[in-house]
Structures are given as C-alpha cells and as structure tokens.
Image (cartoon, grey):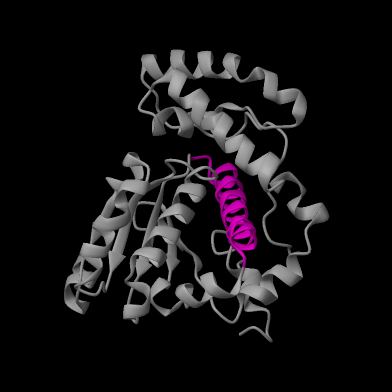
Amino acid sequence: AGARADGRYKHCALRPDIFGEAPPPRYAQDNNDALPLPEMSPKEVAGLAELLARVSDLTPRGVRTDRSTLLPFLRARKGSVKNAEAYYRKAVEYRYDRLRMHELDTHWNLEAYERILAPWWTRGGILGHGLKGQVVGFERFGRCRFAELLDAIPWEILLRLDAVHMQRTLAACEEDSLRRGRPTVATLVLDLEGLGMESLNFKTALAYGKLISYRDMIMPNMVSHILVIRSPKAFAQTFKMFSYILDPVTRDKVQIVSGHEESLACL
C-alpha cells in the first residue's frame, strides 16, 4: 500500500471521484463565509456575533475568524462566549504559534512526515458518508503500534504528524460541505481489535488522551458520535484512567463496546 501511495486517497473519500488526479484537500487559510452553518438558536446567533467581535484582533494575523470556524468553539463551551474565546485563543496558540500549521503546505516536508509515520500507524481515514449523510471516519487504533511510537519519536514531532492528518481531514470536510451545501456532522469509529496489553497502561493512555485534546483544538465539536468497537474488556477501566483529560463535550460522545456481534450492532 505504501509503494502504491494509497495514503494519498485517505482524505478523498468524500469526493465523487475518490481516485482522481486532484491533490489532497488543502485547508483554506482565509475566512470563508460561504460554508453552510447548522441551525442556531437566537442565543447562539447573538453569542456567535459577540465571539466574532471579541476575536477580530486575530484576523490581521491571517487567523481564520469566520462563523464556521468559531461556532464549533462556542458549542464546545456550551454557549459561553467568554469560555469560547479563551478556548479559541488557546487553539490559535497551539495551531499557529506552536505548530505553525498555516505553513503546512508551504514549509513542511510532508513526504518525510509520511515516511516516519508509516511503520507504526496503520492507515485509517475517511470512509465516506453514512446513511444520514454524516461524514464517517475510521481509525484502526488496535493495529497501530502507538506505545512503540511514543518511545521512538519525540512528542513534538508526533503532534505535527497527527496535525497533518487532522488539518487535511478538516479541509476534506469543508470541501464536502461546500459541495453538498450542508454543515459537517461526523461519526468517528475507533476499532480496537488487536490492541495489546502494552497499550493498556497509564503512560500510553495519558499520551493518547492528550493527543485527543489537541485534536479537539483543530476540529472541536464536529463529531457527534465516537464509537469504540471491538474493545478489550480491560480498556473500559483504562479509559476511566485518562478520560478526565478529555474535553467533557468529547467525553460524553464516547460509546465503548466489546465483541464482534456487539460492535456490529453498535454500528
């Protein structure tokens, strides 16, 4: 699969021509008010307008401050404009200052990042659309050698590797949203089949929990369900150990099931 460069299609499954010659989706750095928004309550409309005004100082820096970018942060903080502003500024610090993700397509050596990740991380990606039109993502975490990855690669490099995937996923969702004229709603499926005991420890769980919290700063509140399938029995206890790290809104969306039949029923 690596020799065939199959990974180039992992973010293209939402397109009518998945295997076309077009390059992978690229995240737009400029505000885009053409992106469809979900229905909002009057309180949300007013809160979003206030949030736009409060973060307008970021716009001259080239930071996106459009409504489709800010609404997920507002909802992730359950309508609190003050908390949403703090969360977004924290995300900007992570994305623009720490990782410099706005330079991903111009300054990063993406080919090198892909080669580094390949031996450890079994390919996941976007599967397509679900029965209700939602975006469906799939990650074979049980087959990924995440514990080894933590020992082999510096943490900051790992964050950048994951950021490549997350920003391209976000770009794919926005591209799809514009094409279909509907806001993005997504379901994430985490398949834990094959997960070994080396991953069921506090160090690995803590690191993955932190990784999810950073992912939330790139794609906050865009996933409606997180289905953890074929989970080892011990995973539920491990999850309790690190779930406090997760954003409460994200944590409440997690559903864990074990066994083949139970997992199929969940899906």
**Residue 195 visible to an observer of this rendering:** no
Q: In the image, which residues are magenta?
A: 154-182
Residue 105: quarter of image: bottom right
Which residue is found at the position 28% from the left and 69% from the top? 229
- Residue 217 coordinates in the image, percent (x, y): 52, 42
- Residue 157 coordinates in the image, percent (x, y): 65, 62
Q: Quadrant of the C terminus?
A: bottom left
Choose between 74 and 85: the one closer to the eye. Answer: 85
Residue 204: quarter of image: bottom left
Q: Quadrant of the N terminus?
A: bottom right
- Residue 189 coordinates in the image, percent (x, y): 36, 63
Which residue is found at the position 27% from the left and 57% from the top? 241
Q: Is residue 94 placed above or below 80 in the rendered structure?
A: below
Q: Residue furthest right?
A: 106
Which residue is found at the position 82% from the left and 54% from the top? 107
Q: Is residue 117 placed above or below 71 in the rendered structure?
A: below
Which residue is found at the position 62% from the left and 50% from the top? 171
**Residue 97 visible to an observer of this rendering:** yes
Choose between 238 and 42: the one closer to the eye. Answer: 238
Q: Is residue 26 placed above or below 89 in the rendered structure?
A: below
- Dominant secondary structure, magenta: helix
Relative to residue 126, is residue 58 drawn left or right?
right
Relative to residue 86, is residue 61 drawn left or right?
right
Relative to residue 218, is residue 62 drawn left or right?
right
Q: Is residue 220 placed above or below 243 in the rendered structure?
A: above
Residue 227 on the magenta segment: no
Residue 47: quarter of image: top left
- Residue 222 coordinates in the image, percent (x, y): 44, 44
Residue 157 on the magenta segment: yes
Numbered circles on residues, count: 0
